[in-house]
């Protein structure tokens, strides 16, 4: 079983709350749930929808086909009836009329006027629609009631229960949804997972400036500020944010900043400052479609090249593409260790899709998170040399103020071992080489991409980050149909780990890059690092994430 | 205690020498040790000052000395943080940070070496260059009104606003010590000559105009402070223009005031597990 419920309406009609309530009810019943939001960048009006996909097996992405549409306005039916499955059902909250004739038999019309009258509350009609959904799938109303109690309190809860009973009575069971055996899980989105990873890693300082889709990392952390504790500063702009974070990191705390493409453009000089001062920093870049303001609430993977190259001058960095919420948690925690070990900026590259989708996943294992500060615990006699030249390029790093008599000089100018400004050619050369040596030392840390698919793929897909979910589901489905397809999904992406790529690309006869951008930025990176050219590109850049169905269709049509 | 032997990159007769000396003497008078002090600076001739002093240094980007200094102070409230840079760095490139640093009112001291010109880049107008003053770039004279940092700081609600003068290092040292001791954001705009690129605001020009505020000036009186902050031209007042007690950021930010310095907090991954459990 694999069902999707779509709830659509205008901004301000509460789809988000309804989607959450439905998802939580399904989670309570033990289902694997995937909640995906499709939002316009406006506060009122427009067309927004959420999709709740659920199954008795893990669900890793959204599906195109919809089993039930909950239409809070007529436009929802117009826009989505094409995706309704053959036996799909529509639930409306208006009285008749607007439902096209071919759908009328499959439509349950709830009267919001009746619901308002009987419940005495204007805002509970959506609840009736949700209970109607549960009934269609033969699921107990109690699951929703439990959620209502936790979401609403007092009179509203009573009104909600009245509405829920009305909706439940209005439908007959049509689909058979059987929950799996109970399993331990959490229901979390990518940004929350990043934030939890940062908290687990001991991040004590986050500076940022609001920008969708990165903002919710900061918002979540701010809610935990006193409890954790962690200081969350809303800076006056992104330039200030990254410079504050660098100051905090210099002073010895684990620090982080986060933004989206436009804000990251403002941070570029700060990235370069992290490079030359060798100040550890974790930077989350949650991509959305550009250029400039682009599509603020939608998704894209078009800033890979930008993040890999941002910042003038040459210095080592690490870019990790986050693939799913669990990956986001563990990689974020790892990012803090590597930033401090190599004294470099480490990037968490994510996007709106991953930032905002909420999924049931196995609880994170905090025992797997270790904190390695890589700070010097003792210093030699004499002057402290912040940039002491060593074989690895890594200099012992101390925190200012902690060693009487020892001073920490860091400089954005080229500097000598002590951190003092210099233009001496020999020193310049030795410092450039020192920074390059750190980059070389970093290489063994790189994690190879995850391989999905059959043992001997004829077609090898290369992709990265949030396309993990749709690609994984598509590849496994195609394998079942005996297509010899495999996929390498990159997490660590710069520097590019190449071992698995070289091995699998030798076996496969076709190399296909699948990306959420128009120019194939991963393909360029692969070619640059390995000389391997992709034979075919599957690119999507309409601001909507590749779905598993679209991946399957594109592969069958263009590649297989 | 804060003195080190290091050859400077300043021109002979540069006003920065006096400011450097004033800063060292001011720090010495406070019984601070070098490792307890961090100087965050930007880029410019003024911003090189921390290279010539014995204290921790974060010599960051042009215009960004304030946010870096703020990050340092937020991370470790035990450190004495001084933000030091030129007029271009502080009021031009970093103007937005200046505005919001005043609003934030964190306990830092902001020393602006105001030579009314961009020194390092060879003499272009800065935000404080007088209207009509000619430079190589502004060959017809500056067309913009100069920015008055003191009135701006007052308008934004700063609790400590002062003007110093490079040529009187004793007074300057005392002013710097007072600013460092002040709990909150303290601004000292320090008048300074640039013998190479500012041929108008010379030592002679300043000496004919500057005077110290007398005991009659009440720095707690905003009305008087505004009048003195606006005074410029024939007579230029020096000293503490405005001073009152304010609610310093660290004192009312619960994360900062309820905890030891953030840098001293223990880090234990498992402590965050309870936050994950809320997602069950
Ligand atoms: C982002 C950036 N823009 C421009 C510069 C070039 N620059 C360096 S210092 C400076 C102006 C310095 O003027 P000021 O801050 O008044 O310092 P002064 O040299 O006069 O002491 C400029 C424009 C730079 N380093 N970085
Ligand atoms: Mg200047």
Image (cartoon, rainbow, N blue to C red):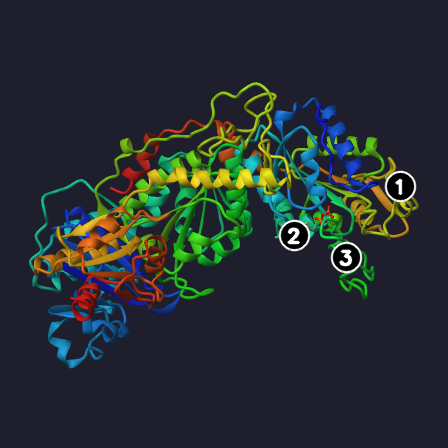
Any part of residue B170 in sight: yes
Quarter of the image holding residue A65? Answer: bottom left
Subunit bearing disc 2: B
Discs 1 and 3 lie in a common subunit: yes
* Mark 2 or 1, nearer chain start: 2
Look at the numbered disc 3 and give the secondary structure of its residue: loop
The residue lying furthest to the front in this view is: A426
Measure the alpha-carbon separation of dots 3 and 2: 13 Å
Residue where numbered disc 3 is placed: B146
Pick the front one: B9 or B170: B9
Say left or right for A219 vs B119. Answer: left
Quarter of the image holding residue A477? Answer: bottom left
Give the residue drawn at x 59%, y 37%: A427
Check the picture and name the quadrant holding the N terminus of chain A: bottom left
Discs 3 and 2 lie in a common subunit: yes
Discs 2 and 1 lie in a common subunit: yes
Check the picture and name the quadrant holding the C terminus of chain A: bottom left
Give the answer, above or below, for where B215 lies relative to A159. above
Measure the alpha-carbon separation of dots 1 and 3: 21 Å
Give the residue drawn at x 20%, y 54%: A506
Subunit bearing disc 3: B
Pick the front one: B265 or B222: B265
Pick the front one: A501 or A353: A501
Any part of residue A359 in sight: no
Measure the alpha-carbon separation of dots 2 and 1: 28 Å
Q: How far from the left and from the top, in percent, is residue A212?
A: 42, 57
Residue where numbered disc 2 is placed: B95
Residue where numbered disc 1 is placed: B211
Look at the numbered disc 1 and give the secondary structure of its residue: strand
């Amino acid at each position: 079983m694999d069902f999707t419920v779509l709830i659509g309406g205008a901004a301000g009609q509460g789809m988000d709350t309804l989607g959450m309530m439905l998802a939580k009810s399904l989670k309570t019943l033990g289902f694997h749930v995937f909640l995906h939001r499709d939002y316009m960048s406006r506060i009122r009006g427009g067309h927004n929808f959420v999709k709740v996909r659920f199954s008795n097996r893990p669900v890793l992405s959204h599906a195109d086909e919809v089993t039930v549409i909950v239409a809070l306005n007529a436009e929802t039916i117009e826009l989505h009836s094409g995706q309704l499955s053959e036996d799909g059902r529509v639930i409306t909250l208006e009285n008749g009329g607007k439902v096209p004739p071919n759908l009328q038999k499959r439509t349950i019309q709830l009267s919001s006027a009746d619901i308002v009258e009987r419940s005495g509350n204007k805002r509970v009609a959506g609840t009736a629609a949700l209970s109607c959904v549960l009934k269609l799938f033969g699921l107990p109303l109690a699951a929703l009631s439990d959620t209502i109690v936790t979401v609403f309190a007092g009179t509203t809860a009573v009104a909600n229960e009245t509405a829920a009973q009305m909706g439940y009575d209005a439908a007959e069971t049509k689909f058979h949804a059987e929950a799996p055996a109970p399993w331990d899980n959490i229901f979390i989105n990518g940004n929350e997972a990043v934030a939890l990873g940062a908290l687990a890693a001991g991040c004590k300082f986050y500076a940022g400036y609001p920008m969708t889709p990165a903002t919710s990392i900061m918002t979540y952390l701010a809610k935990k500020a006193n409890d954790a504790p962690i200081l969350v500063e809303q800076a006056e702009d992104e330039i200030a944010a990254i410079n504050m974070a660098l100051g905090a990191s210099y002073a010895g705390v684990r620090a982080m900043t986060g933004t989206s493409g436009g804000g990251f453009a403002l941070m570029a000089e700060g990235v370069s400052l992290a490079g030359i001062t060798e100040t550890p920093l974790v930077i989350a870049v949650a991509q959305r479609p550009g250029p400039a303001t682009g599509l603020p609430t939608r998704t894209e993977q078009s800033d890979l090249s930008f993040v890999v190259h941002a910042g003038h001058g040459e210095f080592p960095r690490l870019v990790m593409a986050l693939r799913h919420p669990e990956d986001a948690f563990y990689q974020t925690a790892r990012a803090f260790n590597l930033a401090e070990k190599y004294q470099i900026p480490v990037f968490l590259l994510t996007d709106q899709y991953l930032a905002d989708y909420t999924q049931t996943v196995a609880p994170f294992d905090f025992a797997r998170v270790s904190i390695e500060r890589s700070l010097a615990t003792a210093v030699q006699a004499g002057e402290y040399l912040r940039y002491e030249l060593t074989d690895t390029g890594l200099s012992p790093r101390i925190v200012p103020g902690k060693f009487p008599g020892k001073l920490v000089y860091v400089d954005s100018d080229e500097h000598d071992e002590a951190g003092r400004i210099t233009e001496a050619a020999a020193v310049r050369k030795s410092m450039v080489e020192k920074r390059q040596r750190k980059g070389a030392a970093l290489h063994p840390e790189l994690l190879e991409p995850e391989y999905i698919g059959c043992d001997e793929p004829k077609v090898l897909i290369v992709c990265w980050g949030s396309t993990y979910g749709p690609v994984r589901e598509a590849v496994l489905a195609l394998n079942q149909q005996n297509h010899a397809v495999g996929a390498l999904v990159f997490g660590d992406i710069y520097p590019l780990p190449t071992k698995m790529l070289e091995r699998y690309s030798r076996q496969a006869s076709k190399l296909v890059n699948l990306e959420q951008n128009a120019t194939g930025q991963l393909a360029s990176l692969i070619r640059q690092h390995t000389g391997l050219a992709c034979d075919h590109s599957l690119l999507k850049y309409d601001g909507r994430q590749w779905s598993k169905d679209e991946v399957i269709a594109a592969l069958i049509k263009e590649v297989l | 205690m804060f003195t080190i032997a290091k050859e400077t990159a300043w021109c002979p007769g540069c006003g920065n020498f006096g400011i450097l000396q004033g800063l060292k003497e001011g720090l010495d008078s406070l019984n601070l040790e070098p490792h307890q002090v961090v100087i965050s600076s930007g880029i410019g001739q003024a911003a090189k000052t921390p290279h010539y002093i014995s204290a921790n240094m974060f010599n960051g980007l042009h215009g960004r000395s304030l946010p870096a200094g703020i990050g340092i102070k937020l991370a470790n409230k035990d450190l004495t943080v001084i933000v030091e840079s030129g007029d271009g760095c502080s009021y031009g490139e970093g103007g937005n940070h200046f505005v919001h640093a005043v609003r934030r009112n964190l306990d830092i001291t902001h020393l602006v070496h105001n030579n009314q010109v961009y020194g390092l880049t060879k003499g272009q107008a800065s935000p404080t260059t007088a209207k009509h003053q000619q430079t190589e770039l502004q060959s017809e004279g500056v067309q913009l009104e100069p920015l008055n940092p003191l009135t701006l700081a007052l308008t934004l609600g700063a609790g400590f606003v002062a003007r110093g003068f490079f040529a009187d290092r004793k007074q300057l040292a005392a002013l710097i010590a007072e600013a460092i001791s002040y709990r909150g954001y303290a601004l000292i705009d320090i008048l300074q000559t640039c013998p190479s690129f500012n041929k108008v605001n010379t030592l002679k020009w300043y000496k004919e105009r500057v005077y110290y505020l007398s005991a009659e000036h009440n720095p707690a009186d905003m009305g008087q402070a505004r009048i003195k902050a606006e005074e410029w031209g024939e007579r230029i007042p020096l000293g503490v223009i405005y001073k009152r007690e304010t609610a310093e950021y660290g004192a009312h930010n619960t994360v900062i005031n309820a905890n030891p310095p953030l840098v001293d907090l223990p880090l234990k991954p498992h402590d965050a597990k309870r936050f994950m459990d809320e997602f069950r």
